[in-house]
Amino acid sequence: MLAGVDLSGRRILVTGVSAGLGVETARALAAHGAQVVGAARDLAKAEAATEVVRAAAANGGGLELIELDLASLASVRAAADALVAKGEPFDVVIANAGVMAAPFGHTTDGFETQFGTNHLGHFVFINRIASLLRPGGRVVSLASAGHRFANVDLDDPNFTRGDYDPWVAYGRSKTANILFAVEFDRRHRARGVRAAAVHPGGIQTELSRHLEDGAIEAMIAQINADLAAEGKPPFELKTIPQGAATSVWAAVVGEADEIGGRYCEDCHVATNVTDGPLSVASEGVRSYALDPDNARALWAKSEEMVGEVF
């Protein structure tokens, strides 16, 4: 994706640089000359994990780490305020960090863990540093095919009614990540700042740490049984570099007008927008995840939840 691309002089923020996709995304960008600001909850872990980023840095590229706990709005606001006070602009912000299928719990501020971490933490952080995005800048919001599990529930975002399902909660948070990109893009495109959501693909990373042993294998077996019934080849997990490719493509390669307000997968914009049948391994995005009215409603609900208007 970055063959022949010179990112010298570009400043890019990536959240979740203590493992997996975040580290690889930062490595690829720094290797092509970008100055990367990596955000992580555990700085000691991130320092060790990003040695490969510093080793790969070339053409003036480099890495700076900042502390950011997306499950704490106090941490989010402190990190954002420090960046704004510093005043150095960004060309791209990649909202990569997240949790998946976590047991029922709450963030520091009392939000359901996955919605609070994956969506609300990034919602506050990115909005607070939005003024630092240069004209021509971009926001890349990491979503997932898992958004198909559920639309957002603006009446009960914290599962105060009904039984908690970790995959439904994950689906809600990933749909929110897409809707955030849709509305952020609408609000900022006039000044040349665009936003897109990306699905990196099925990848074995620390994101699956909450799953029981054998859960991934069982899911792949079911997917392959469904694909075989359709006469399609078996599903294969992506490597971490393959997964990071779509983030990098949306951040610096794809045309701004092509990716703005859209859902991207496999280094292109998804063209299959449907509420019809979709297997986990198939391409496509649910229409509710790109619905502008849904996006505006989520934005308003998010502002209400965090007590801040953007």
Image: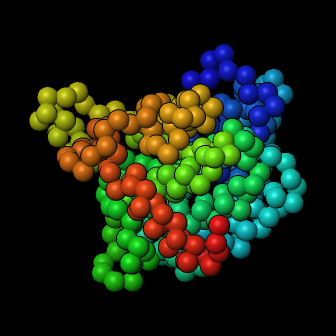
Q: Residue at x 39, y 65 (%)?
A: 152
Q: Position of residue 310 (x, y in %)?
A: 65, 67
Can you name the residue that lies furthest to the front here? Answer: 190
Q: Quadrant of residue 194?
A: top right
Q: Residue at x 73, y 68 (%)?
A: 77
Question: How is the protein colored in the picture?
Answer: rainbow
Can you name the residue that lies furthest to the left here? Answer: 229
Image side of residue 119 versus residue 236, left or right = right
Q: Position of residue 243 (x, y in %)?
A: 49, 36
In the image, residue 131 above or below residue 255: below
In the image, residue 272 above or below residue 124: above
Q: Quadrant of residue 110?
A: bottom right
In the image, residue 74 above or below residue 254: below
In the image, residue 282 above or below residue 305: above
Q: Residue at x 34, y 74 (%)?
A: 164
Q: Residue at x 32, y 50 (%)?
A: 286
Residue 302 in sight in this render:
yes
Looking at the rendered image, the quarter that the N terminus falls into is top right
Between 5 and 216, the one lying in front of the other is 5
Q: Position of residue 192 (x, y in %)?
A: 66, 42
Can you name the residue that lies furthest to the top here? Answer: 4
Image side of residue 277 versus residue 80, left or right = left
Q: Position of residue 45 (x, y in %)?
A: 69, 53
Image side of residue 111 versus residue 90, left or right = left
